[in-house]
Amino acid sequence: MRPTVFVNKFFFAQDAIQQLPQLLKPLQNPVILIDVNLKNQIPHIVHDSFKNDSIIYIDTSYEPTVEYVDKIVADLRTKNSVDGVFGMGGGSTLDFAKAVSNLLTNPGSAADYQGWDLVKQKGIFKVGIPTLSGTGAETSRTCVLMNKAKNLKLGMNSEFSVFDCLILDSKLSKSVPKDQFFYTAMDTYIHCVESLRGSFRHAIADALSIQALDLCREVFESDNLMSEENREKIMTASFFGGCAIANSYVGVVHPFSAGLSMVFGTRHCVGNCIVMNVMDDFYPEESKKFREYVKKHNITLPTGMAKSLSPEQKEKIYAATVCHEKPLVNALGNNYKDTLTPSRVVEIFERM
Ligand code: ZN
């Protein structure tokens, strides 16, 4: 049995970003990875606290790949010994920072550590600064990476992937586009639904998921989706959701979303929403509620992307979906492949 590891410490307040100098004090050569989309809206304190060549912009137009992580790590290995890795952005950037921190103390390539408990040594001191909440990446024990050579989307699932510290400042999510905010917040909602509807039970994970789900519902049912109060609620829900997932599993939505990622490069959170839209067979109530929320907040949801798959794509998308054994067993039982036959899986994708 493995122990549950939570984030050691965190600052949770508006303007918590001002605590940055305090965290940097003991460090000699920290670096910060920032989502390139934030380039023009980085708080002054970040520029004041890091040397220019210690700010690394991460291209997040695709989910992080093992090759991209390896490239950044190779660059950092040539620098003075890095003693702190900060990640600022959404789930992808946070996952990126976790992977980089792990690889700076463990030899080899990111692909060597995709799986459960393969990381041998604690990584470099790492701090997460989410600017968008919902993935739970800030508190989870994994960092999800794409491995195209293996047609696999899998994380470094390890207690060493947990951040040492977080700066949770809801002001940082103020200028996020509404659709993006919705998709990402919905990730927490979906995690919790999948976890609570699954067969694998854990009392603490359940309690955290129930609380997170309540917060999500309050936000989705309110009129002003991105009010200050709601941004703080989603930040809290995401935190709980990430903690819960350490002791629970997702279900049917995430594997299908991973299939979309592998074949179309769809981003995680919008992918989950595309899938949730057609999950009436598995999560009828929640799927219906989801569509109500989309309508209420006037969210644009991509549709029809998997309408006409080629035979090769069908094969690939099926394999990239059903390979997620743990969540699918959690949702559908050991014989999940009897339910998710190739033709049924393809039919579900075609409905999206
Ligand atoms: Zn997710």
Image (cartoon, grey):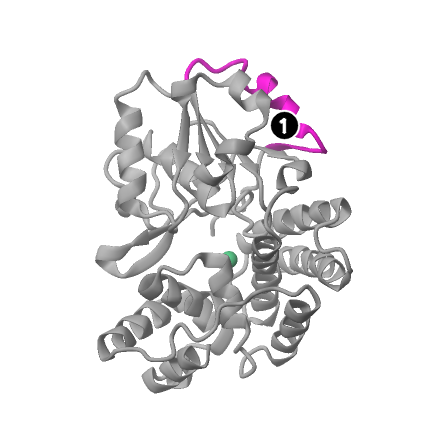
- Residue 161 in view here: yes
In the rendered view, tell whether residue 157 sits above or below residue 260: above
Task: Look at 40% across and 38% down and name the residue there.
Answer: 58
| Residue 113 on image: x %, y % | 31, 45
Task: Look at 60% across and 53% down and name the residue there.
Answer: 181
In the rendered view, tell whether residue 128 sits above or below residue 145: above
Q: From the viewer's perspective, is 149 left or right of 153?
A: left
| Residue 263 on image: x %, y % | 32, 65
Name the foreground residue: 336 vs 183. Answer: 183
Q: Residues within 10 Å of mark 1 (few under 14, many from 20)?
A: many
Q: Which residue is mark 1?
A: 17
Q: Does 117 lie within the magenta span? A: no
Q: From the viewer's perspective, is 15 left or right of 186?
A: right
| Magenta segment boundaries in residue numbering | 9-29
In the rendered view, tell whether residue 267 sits above or below residue 102: below
Task: Look at 30% across and 42% down and name the residue there.
Answer: 68
Task: Look at 45% across and 41% down and name the residue there.
Answer: 93
